[in-house]
Amino acid sequence: MYAIGNDHTAVALKEVIKAHLESKGVEVRDFGTESTTASNYAEKAEEVANAVASGECERGILICGTGIGISIAANKVHGIRAACCSEPFSAKMSKVHNNSNILCFGARVVGTELAKMIVDAWFDAEYEGGRHQARLDTITAIENRN
Ligand code: RB5
């Protein structure tokens, strides 16, 4: 199960991505918003990040105007590694090297086809582990002492 959330800038793109994931057989829990009235991306970030951090959802996707605010907010939740990506290579590597558990992008930055390619690259990628784990352990240690 994937969690998905967005602010007012990304209602249409969220629908495209949700349908795209469903066409791949992925179950999606949609945290909204469905409204194009100005809203606070940080609230959606927290809801989706909690769903992923608790294990209720396996991965999350967050979309705001740039992907930046919503990724910064998601990364405040313990255990979250949210990556803001505007192209497929970074999306893939964010999983392979960083074991990202939330993918973020900006509805004002990427078009629908590029967004689908970013999602596909992340969806297909697997965490490599090995030498990368010590680095992720350091990130967790930073999280725990600050
Ligand atoms: C909303 O105007 C915009 O600031 C938000 O969608 C996002 O881009 C923040 O990082």
Image (cartoon, rainbow, N blue to C red):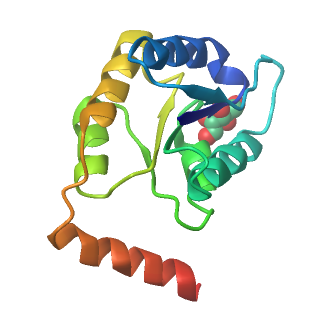
Give the quadrant of residue 62.
top right
Name the one closer to the observer, 58 or 91: 58
Q: Which residue is drawn at 59% across and 13% down?
A: 15
Give the quadrant of residue 53.
bottom right
Reply above or below: 51 against 139. above
Q: Which residue lies furthest to the bottom in this view?
A: 145
Reply above or below: 132 against 58. below
Q: Residue at x 80, y 18 (%)?
A: 35
Q: Which residue is drawn at 31% across and 39% down?
A: 91
Q: Which residue is drawn at 66% across and 45% down?
A: 45
In x, y percent, where is residue 123?
A: 33, 33
**Quarter of the image containing the C terminus?**
bottom right
In x, y percent, where is residue 121?
A: 27, 30
In x, y percent, where is residue 114?
A: 34, 17
Name the one closer to the observer, 16 or 10: 16
In x, y percent, where is residue 78?
A: 59, 68
Q: Is residue 118 left or right of residue 44?
A: left
Q: Is residue 136 left or right of residue 82?
A: left
Q: Report the number of numbered marks.
A: 0
Reply above or below: 96 against 110. below
Q: In this view, does 5 lie to the left or right of 13?
A: right
The quadrant where ligand 1 appears is top right
